[in-house]
Amino acid sequence: MLQEILNDVGIAVFAASGALLGVRKDFDLWGIVTVGALTGVGGGILRDVVLGITPPTSIQNWPPIVIAAVASLVVFIFHPTFALLRRSVLIFDAVGMGVFATSGAAIAVDHGVSAFAATLVGLLTAVGGGILRDVMANEIPLLLQPADLYAVPALLGAAVVAVGGIHTPAPIWVWLVTGTIVATGLRIAGLAFGWRLPTAPRPRARRHS
């Protein structure tokens, strides 16, 4: 039950981030709802495609799409308020990322894949919606930009669930909670302290005599 609630919160927050990008790009109502909904459920759809779950859960059942669409409509109407609440949105986004990473890994574990595969599926679930959002908006995916830590926390949270769920006797919910705390906590710490991965050094310009 707790996982379902957190998953719905994650869908809503991810959809809101997609809708906000649509607002900044001057999309119309249909475009904003479309990019918002795809951001909210895109990671889950990619997860299900990789695991062979057909049709994907997010389009087989109505709640995920409805939650994403409603969140996008709220952003369309109240987007100036969301801009003022940017820090709060980032916190919720961190929670949603952590939940998506760990729930994706847990579902992969249930389907009998290896710990390595489950970790990658969890990562894909967490970042897939954002990649689709950026591609639709003709942006360089945030995942590839030198921004605050995002993929690394998702990868570590998913790994906690994958390794713990397969190689230890503890119930999966223990690893779900632990992995979500790890992923969300590292993401929030990265935002607070400006942690980033290093970029490749640029060659120094030669001085002409």
Image (tube, rainbow, N blue to C red):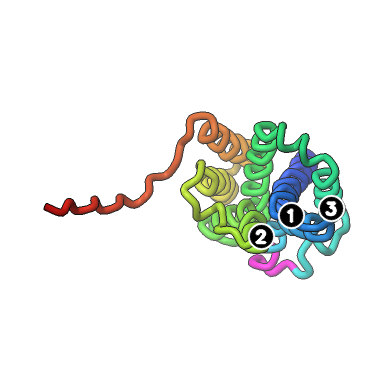
Graded by Cα atoms within 10 Å as few (under 14), some (14 to 19) or many (20 or more), the crowding at tag 2 reads: some
203 to 149, vertically: above or below: below
Q: Quadrant of residue 141?
A: bottom right
Task: Identify which residue is drawn at 67% across, 41% down.
Answer: 93
Which residue, given by chain and number where applicable, does mark 1 sit on? 26
Secondary element under disc 1, as helix, strand or loop, is: loop
- 78 lies left or right of 198: right
The count of marks equals: 3
> In the rendered structure, which segment of residues is drawn in magenta?
47-53
Name the residue type under label 3: Ala
- 115 lies left or right of 81: left
Q: Is residue 49 magenta?
A: yes
Tag shown at residue 137 = 2
First of labels 1, 2 by sequence position: 1
Tag shown at residue 69 = 3
Tell me the quarter of the image containing the N terminus.
top right
Numbered disc in front, either 1 or 3: 1
158 to 140, vertically: above or below: above
203 to 80, vertically: above or below: below
Name the residue type under label 2: Ala
First of labels 1, 3 by sequence position: 1
Graded by Cα atoms within 10 Å as few (under 14), some (14 to 19) or many (20 or more), the crowding at tag 3 reads: many
Residue situated furthest front in the rendering: 209
In 3D space, how far apart are the residues under numbered discs 3 and 2 (Cα atoms)?
17 Å
Numbered disc in front, either 3 or 2: 2
In 3D space, how far apart are the residues under numbered discs 1 and 2 (Cα atoms)?
10 Å
Secondary element under disc 2, as helix, strand or loop, is: loop
Report x, y in % for residue 62: 88, 57
Graded by Cα atoms within 10 Å as few (under 14), some (14 to 19) or many (20 or more), the crowding at tag 1 reads: few
Tag shown at residue 77 = none
- Is any atom of residue 112 visible in this view? no
